[in-house]
Image (cartoon, grey):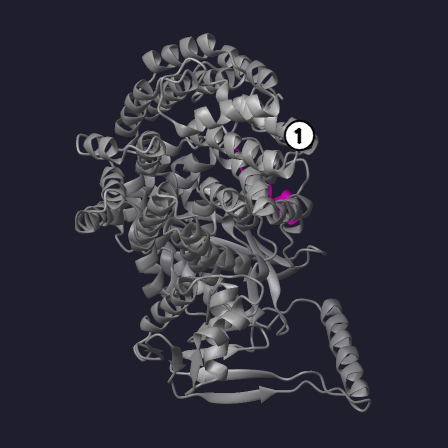
């Protein structure tokens, strides 16, 4: 009987496989979002024919109204993918105001999977033969020089290379050999090589810090890693040279499959020794394929760079991030072509601009060097995330998880990314799977799960996850205490949150920002005087980003007392303190100040204020102010300046996204509710989640009540001052959300809920002279509902 056919379309360097739903360039997968993939598929299926915009809309968004911009963005993403090939610049032609035409030369192949009764005996015979061969092989003793593998894919782990040279200063070299072997062997087509990060995490559970793994435990580590075969060995002195002894074993039985030694006359010879070992192991384990080409994806060829890199890894594992960054930077200085050193440096940098430069360099090198697939995809996923291309980053992480199912860290990174995109159910599922696949007593996924459950409003599960996270660490470790406090705060349990934060201050006064968090929690609990005193104390005792957060809290306290002018001053100060190392926080603080002017219908005042400050976001504020003042040429000049300032920090894509969102802000501030709703689909992901208030308010003003209530409720999660992680809370937006929820509840006839929301809003402005229209409206609503 025949199953549905699939097609493979080839054009230029590309292959589109409809069976797997994937696009490949030179046999390497190209991550596409589902909508971009559907856009491409529709174009290819109708190659040469004009596909009208209406046809795209019916296929891609059958139940949702979206504007043409969403389709244009999909086509733009495709053109960028094609432009990376020498042949793809003109694959998609725009027919103005009508649609798009795909004009590449196509080769199409149909695949139909058929099974008949006659094939089953053949399949069965093949399976039996393979099983018999496997049994025979297991019984036969190992013979030197004989190939030891079938062609099926197997998972391999390089566990540990012990330093037996009697020179402790060379301990790093054993780790270096592990990294070099892992990187080189990952090129073998029929081997799935487990990352050194995963292996080292498992080793850390077997030994105390600083200790080597006993050879007797290597097999247990390999079993926990899910490896079918594993490599271990030792490094010995041979006069002035070295000898590398390697042993390849079956994980289940412990049987030695291959053992050999490789010699070199100096430490620098370690690279040729590893190359020789890689070629020998690959030829024995995968005899059906050509030997790997280790030099194409070698980690580095510079001994000093390798040493600095291993020092960085060691510091990173002990959470000494500054020292790790210094070591990784030295590695890149010794070897400017060291892609993975740039990648790790990007993760450790405290300065955002330098972090981005390191990641950009890692991406450039990864594209040229042919790194192992997992390393290449990890760099690509983090680059997409940094560029704000969240959906593409999620798809790339999903590819990593699918292709490398034994790895845990990519699952945790994916779970966190989904969480910050507001996709909480998906985040929880991914993180729960990470916890299930690993030792349940030693999994870092529990910390991430605690926050995901808290954002879902599930306090019980969140606290249970914190307990499991705490079990990983010493009883006095400050991190689980801080996580527990954050969970209470996110769930609105401010008194419990304050108690946990205070416990951390007492036990760990050096821990990051506990006083600032206490101040914000006290503000939410309505304890204004205590909140201000605590925030002032934190402000006096802190510097840099910590002081910026204290200034942010003082601004929120001022807002809570209705002192808008004072709040603006504090937010501007927080932006100045944040900008050197955390420009995105500076951007957020600038807008927290600006929105006070715009919500009071004072664009001229916002313009005057933004002309006096020199921080990221000020040009955007001026652009929005000019739009509201009907001066579009001036607005465009400011947006051009804003884009130029943001590109070095955020990249082209996010700079464009922020400018587009600025135009949506202007539409919201001027009451263009239809435009806000129509343009919103462009802003999915974290930018949309953090600003859901704008869409909720638009639906409320258009009396689209079910949509408004959902969006406003969801938006509270992300702007709530209970979200005490970093400086992401927005007290003013939180209060305005309360007002509009009150308005929606009143229109829905939910009188009690409406009164509660209105009262929560006006309670902060009883003594305020602020010219905020919503204050008078809420007071009038409360009088009306009291009748």
Q: Position of residue 280 (x, y in %)?
A: 49, 67
Q: Which residues are magenta?
A: 211-219
Quarter of the image where one finds residue 227: bottom right
Task: Give yes or no for residue 218 being in the magenta stretch.
Answer: yes
Residue drawn at the location 62% of the way across and 70% of the way down: 149
Residue drawn at the location 42% of the way across and 28% of the way down: 732
Residue drawn at the location 69% of the way across and 30% of the way down: 464
In this rendering, the answer to whether 554 lies above or below 668 is above
Q: Which residue is mark 1?
A: 459
**Callout 1 secondary element:** helix
In this rendering, the answer to whether 782 lies above or below 673 is above
Task: Give yes or no for residue 15 being in the magenta stretch.
Answer: no
Q: Position of residue 725 (x, y in %)?
A: 47, 30
Q: Position of residue 451 (x, y in %)?
A: 58, 35
Residue positioned most to the front: 787
Residue drawn at the location 52% of the way across and 39% of the way down: 715
**Of the pair 589 and 84, the residue shown nearer to us:** 589
Q: Position of residue 342 (x, y in %)?
A: 33, 49
Left or right: where 348 falls relative to 436 = left
| Residue 163 in sight here | no
In this rendering, the answer to whether 359 lies above or below 767 is below
Classify mark 1: residues with Cα within 10 Å, few (<14), some (14-19) or many (20+). many
């Amino acid at each position: 009987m025949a199953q549905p056919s699939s097609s493979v379309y080839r054009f230029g360097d590309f292959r589109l496989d409809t069976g797997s739903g994937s696009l490949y360039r030179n046999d390497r997968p190209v991550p596409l979002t589902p909508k971009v993939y559907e856009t491409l598929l529709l174009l290819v299926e109708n190659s040469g024919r004009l596909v009208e915009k209406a046809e795209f809309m019916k296929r891609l968004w059958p139940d949702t109204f979206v504007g043409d911009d969403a389709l244009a963005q999909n086509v733009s993403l495709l053109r960028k993918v094609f432009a990376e090939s020498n042949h793809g610049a003109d694959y998609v032609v725009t027919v103005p105001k009508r649609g798009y035409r795909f004009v590449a030369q196509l080769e199409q192949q149909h695949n139909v999977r058929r099974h008949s009764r006659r094939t089953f005996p053949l399949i069965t015979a093949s399976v039996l033969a393979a099983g018999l061969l496997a049994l025979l092989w297991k019984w036969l003793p190992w013979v030197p020089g004989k190939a030891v593998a079938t062609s099926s894919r197997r998972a391999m782990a390089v566990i540990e290379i012990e330093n037996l040279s009697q020179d402790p200063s060379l301990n790093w070299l054993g780790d270096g050999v592990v990294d070099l072997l892992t990187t080189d062997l990952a090129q073998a087509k029929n081997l799935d090589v487990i990352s050194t990060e995963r292996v080292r995490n498992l080793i850390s559970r077997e030994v105390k810090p600083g200790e080597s793994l006993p050879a007797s435990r290597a097999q247990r580590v390999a079993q926990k890693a899910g490896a079918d075969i594993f490599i271990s060995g030792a490094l010995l002195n041979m006069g002035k040279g070295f000898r590398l002894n390697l042993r390849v074993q079956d994980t289940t039985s412990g049987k030695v499959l291959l053992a050999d030694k490789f010699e070199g006359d100096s430490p620098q010879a370690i690279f040729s020794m590893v190359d020789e070992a890689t070629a020998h192991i690959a030829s024995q384990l995968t005899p059906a394929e050509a030997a790997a080409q280790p030099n194409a994806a070698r980690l580095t060829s510079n001994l000093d760079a390798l040493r600095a890199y291993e020092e960085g890894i060691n510091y990173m594992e002990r959470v000494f991030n500054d020292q790790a960054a210094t070591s990784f930077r030295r590695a890149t200085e010794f070897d400017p072509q060291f892609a993975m050193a740039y990648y790790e440096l990007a993760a450790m940098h405290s300065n955002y601009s330098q972090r981005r430069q390191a990641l950009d360099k890692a991406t450039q090198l990864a594209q040229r060097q042919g790194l192992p697939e997992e390393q290449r995809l990890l760099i690509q996923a983090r680059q997409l995330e940094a560029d704000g291309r969240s959906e593409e980053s999620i798809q790339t992480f999903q590819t990593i998880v699918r292709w490398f199912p034994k790895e845990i860290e990519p699952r945790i990174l994916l779970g966190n990314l989904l969480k910050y995109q507001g996709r909480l159910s998906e985040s929880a599922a991914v993180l729960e799977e990470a916890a299930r696949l690993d030792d349940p007593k030693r999994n870092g996924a529990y910390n991430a799960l605690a926050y995901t459950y808290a954002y879902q409003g599930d306090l019980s599960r969140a606290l249970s996850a914190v307990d499991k996270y705490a079990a990983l660490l010493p009883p006095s470790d400050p991190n689980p205490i801080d996580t527990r406090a954050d969970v209470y705060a996110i769930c609105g349990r401010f008194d419990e949150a304050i108690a946990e934060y205070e416990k951390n201050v007492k036990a760990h006064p050096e821990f990051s920002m506990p006083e600032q968090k206490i101040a914000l929690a006290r503000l939410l609990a309505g304890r204004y005087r205590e909140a201000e005193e605590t925030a002032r104390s934190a402000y006096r005792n802190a510097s840099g980003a910590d002081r910026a957060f204290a200034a942010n809290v003082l601004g929120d306290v001022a807002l809570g007392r209705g002192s808008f002018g004072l709040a603006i001053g504090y937010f501007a100060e927080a932006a100045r303190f944040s900008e050197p190392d955390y420009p995105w926080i500076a951007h957020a603080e600038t807008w927290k100040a600006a929105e006070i002017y715009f919500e009071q219908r004072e664009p001229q005042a916002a313009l005057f204020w933004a002309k006096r400050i020199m921080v990221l976001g000020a040009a955007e504020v001026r652009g929005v102010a000019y739009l509201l003042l009907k001066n579009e040429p001036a607005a465009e000049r400011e947006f051009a300046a804003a884009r130029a300032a943001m590109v070095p920090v955020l990249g082209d894509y996010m700079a464009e996204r922020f400018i587009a969102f600025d135009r949506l802000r202007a539409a919201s501030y001027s009451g263009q509710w239809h435009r806000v709703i129509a343009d919103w689909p462009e802003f999915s992901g974290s930018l949309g989640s953090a600003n859901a208030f704008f869409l909720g308010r638009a639906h409320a003003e258009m009396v689209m009540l079910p949509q408004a209530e959902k969006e406003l409720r969801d938006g509270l999660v992300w702007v709530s001052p209970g979200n005490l992680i970093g400086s992401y809370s927005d007290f003013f937006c939180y209060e305005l959300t309360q007002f509009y929820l009150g308005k929606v509840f009143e229109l829905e006839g939910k009188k009690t809920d409406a009164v509660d929301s209105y009262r929560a809003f006006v309670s902060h402005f009883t003594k305020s002279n602020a010219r905020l229209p919503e204050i008078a409206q809420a007071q009038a609503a409360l009088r009306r509902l009291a009748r």
